[in-house]
Amino acid sequence: MTKRAVLPAGMTPGLLDHFAAAAWCGVSPNQFTEFVEPVVPPVYIGGKKLWSVKCLQLWVDARTGIRSNDHYNSVSDDDWLAELHSAGSDYTDSRR
């Protein structure tokens, strides 16, 4: 069994597994799967599915109107997802 790496004190993970991402969003894993996962793409590392804390934060900010960029506040989830994929296609491409 491989030992899991532990982050140094004070360092925050940049990627979260399904359960941690759901907890970060304040929803159950089932709610995360239903409402968040379809619009915030995971990153695949090996066979593991992970979510970027930055992408989750951007999505939450856009949904709540915190983001000051009017373009992103008015973009539909589908258009936002397409922009996210084109901007970070190397990171969202499955099974890398």
Image: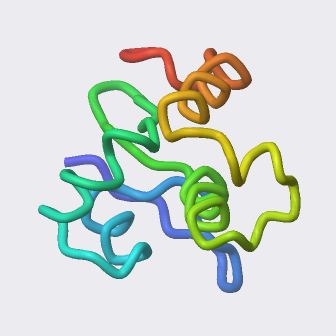
* Residue occupying the point 66% across, 67% down: 61
Instruction: Report the side of 74 relative to 78 (left or right).
Output: right
All told, the count of numbered labels is: 0
Residue placed most toward the observer, 88 or 95:
88
The picture quadrant where one finds residue 89 is top right
* Residue occupying the point 68% across, 24% down: 88
Residue at the limit of the structure toward the front, as seen here: 74
Instruction: Report the side of 46 relative to 96 (left or right).
Output: left
Residue 81, how many percent across, how many down? 54, 31
Residue 73, how many percent across, how many down? 71, 54
Residue placed most toward the observer, 73 or 89:
73
* Residue occupying the point 55% across, 50% down: 52
* Residue occupying the point 55% across, 39% down: 76
Residue 26, how many percent across, how many down? 35, 81
Residue 84, how many percent across, how many down? 64, 30
Instruction: Report the side of 87 relative to 53 (left or right).
Output: right
* For residue 20, above or below residue 79: below
Colour approach in the figure: rainbow
Residue placed most toward the observer, 53 or 95:
53
* For residue 21, above or below residue 73: below
